[in-house]
């Protein structure tokens, strides 16, 4: 069983920065594409950023140039550096791991961490 544990959320003023971390247990991390998603109250969960096994990254247009996703396979951790935060970034942020083992796909989620940006 794989567990993803997010940390680093909190309250920050607009223009500030936060770094989220997602620590993974289990042996699949290096085989997984990792992603950060977020869900604001009353809204659907949306993709924020992804990073492939080899380090290729993608970003939602709303965070390009402000957020950076990275991974450390030795520490089995994925990070989301968030700069120039805006009130509209307020949401619960979720870590996600997808991949396949023996052609059997998997999709794991963390429990989420709250990010609140005050104006």
Image (cartoon, rainbow, N blue to C red):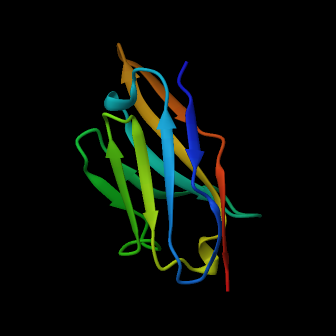
Residue furthest to the top: 102
Q: Quadrant of the N terminus?
A: top right
Q: Where 63 falls versus 70 (above or below)?
A: below
Would you identify the image quadrant in which residue 86 lies? bottom right
- Report the side of 107 relative to 104 (left or right): right
Residue 23 position in % (x across, y down): 49, 38
> At 30% from the left edge and 55% from the top edge, which residue is drawn?
57
- Report the side of 85 relative to 58 (left or right): right
Residue 107 position in % (x across, y down): 51, 31
> At 50% from the left edge and 72% from the top edge, which residue is drawn?
17
Residue 59 position in % (x across, y down): 38, 63
Q: Where 28 falls versus 59 (above or below)?
A: above
Q: Where 115 falls versus 100 (above or below)?
A: below
> At 39% from the left edge and 34% from the top edge, which residue is drawn?
76
Residue 33 position in % (x across, y down): 37, 39
Total marks placed: 0
């Amino acid at each position: 069983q794989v567990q993803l544990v997010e940390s680093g959320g909190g309250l920050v003023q607009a223009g500030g920065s936060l770094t989220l971390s997602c620590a993974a247990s289990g042996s699949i991390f290096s085989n997984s594409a990792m992603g950060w998603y977020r869900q604001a109250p009353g809204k659907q969960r949306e993709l924020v950023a992804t990073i492939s096994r080899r380090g290729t990254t993608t970003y939602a247009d709303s965070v390009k140039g402000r957020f950076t996703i990275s991974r450390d396979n030795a520490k089995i951790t994925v990070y989301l550096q968030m700069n120039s935060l805006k009130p509209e970034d307020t949401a619960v942020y979720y870590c996600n791991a997808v991949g396949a083992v023996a052609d059997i796909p998997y999709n794991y989620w963390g429990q989420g961490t709250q990010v609140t940006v005050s104006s």
